[in-house]
Amino acid sequence: MSQNQNKRTLRTIGLVVAVTLLTKILGIVREALQAGVFGTQTAFDLYTISYNYTIYIFTTVAYALCIAAVPVISRHLAEDRNKAFAVAGNLICVSVLVSALVVVLLSVLIRFAPVGHWLGVSNADLPTLRTYLQICLLTLPLIVVIYLLVAVFQSMEHYTLQGSLSLPYNLLLIVFLVLFSSSERVLEYVLVICFAWLLQFAMTIPCIVREKFRLIPGLHFRDPDLRLFARTTVFTTSIFLLCYLADSNTVSAFGSGAVSAVYYADKLFTPVATTLIYSISVVLFPKYNLTYSQVNAQEYKRYVGGTVENTLFVILPFSALFSAFAVPIIHVLFESGNFNTVSTQMTSSVFAMYALGMAGFCVLDLINKAYYTMHKTLTPLLINAVVLALNIALNLVFRSGQSCGLIARTTAVSLTVGGVIALVCF
């Protein structure tokens, strides 16, 4: 890569980081206000569980679909814009149809299955949990459409779109928390969160107009591009989410507030990690595709190795800093109102451990994308399976300690081991 290309890449990454950082700062402000209003009470645990098993999973799945769609759409854009739009239309229509069927099936499951037993919720709280779950389910098709549109426009080098999606979303929730703050208004908060996803869709409209994007409907299930798209497994792009859900499920037996403490730690760790990691990878991923098409395998691997090494030089100091100062960070950001000193101690112990796993998380994300560019999905799938299996096994070993921080440490260890394995294999 020439010096001018390197400079352009760095400028693009800097712009994406700036936009993403602004969004994440607003997200942290939202979480701080949310902590003050709702704290770590049992009622908020129900919202946390509902969010974890619906919107959080949906956004992770949609992000995986976005990653899968970028190389497919990019290849066609280089040849024929209309063909690329037709392929994108087919991917969107098929994905929306599948997501709608999933919503129907999950609605039936929530209504008749023993979800309270599965998620560790008492019979008294089960009706509330079911209500929250049913409301959040409705966001799935919309989230899928948003992220597939992001894939289309990332392929057209609109790198800041993904980072800016949440700006109006966060602003709306901040306004709600400031003007209508009450620990009893959890249901209203769930409804506002679901409505706010429409604002994220609105953020794609300027790109739709600027690029004159036309949705060409299609349900071509035998399309080779759809098969390639389907090969990119969600599992390999959602490893931290799966570890977090395993942690959350483990600590649900630790008493009131434990699930919420893990939730708040994740909601601080994820913005920090994604601002640094995804801002870099969202620019590098299309460049992986371009480089792979222009050089031989060894040069491509050297290029990927260089990007991983440079990224780790940025990530490691932040990882150590956040872990060392977890308590004051949580105290300053969250401790107020219903979020007390005990909440701070529980949350900071989890955040400190998650921060130590940032480097492993970073390596897994970059190496996964490097494999996707090569159309190889089995190796990252197996590596991430090892990470999840190790995390679950360690949770089982250490759950008797009744410590949220100890459970979070298993995730840090698992991610780090996974990162080392990924580098060695690649």
Image (spheres, rainbow, N blue to C red):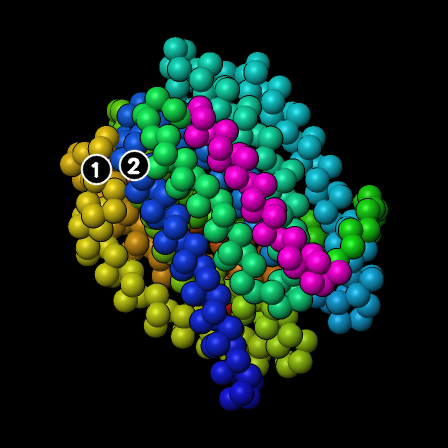
Q: Which residue is mark 2?
A: 35
The chief SS type of the magenta part is helix
**Residue at left offset 16%, top offset 36%:** 341
Q: Does the residue at mark 1 contact the one at mark 2 (Cβ under 8 Å)?
A: yes
Q: Which amino acid is tagged 1? A: Ser
In which quarter of the view is residue 173 placed? top left
- Classify 391 as above or below 45: below
Which is more N-terminal, label 2 or label 1?
Answer: 2
Mark 1 neighbour density, 10 Å: few (under 14) some (14–19) many (20 or more): some
Residue farthest bottom in this picture: 3
Q: Which mark is residue 336?
A: 1
Magenta highlight on residue 325: no
Report the front residue among 85 and 250: 85
Residue 94 image point, x, y percent? 75, 43
Residue 171 image point, x, y percent? 44, 45
In which quarter of the view is residue 359 placed? bottom left
Residue farthest front in this picture: 179
Q: Quadrant of the N terminus?
A: bottom right
**Residue at left offset 74%, top offset 49%:** 91
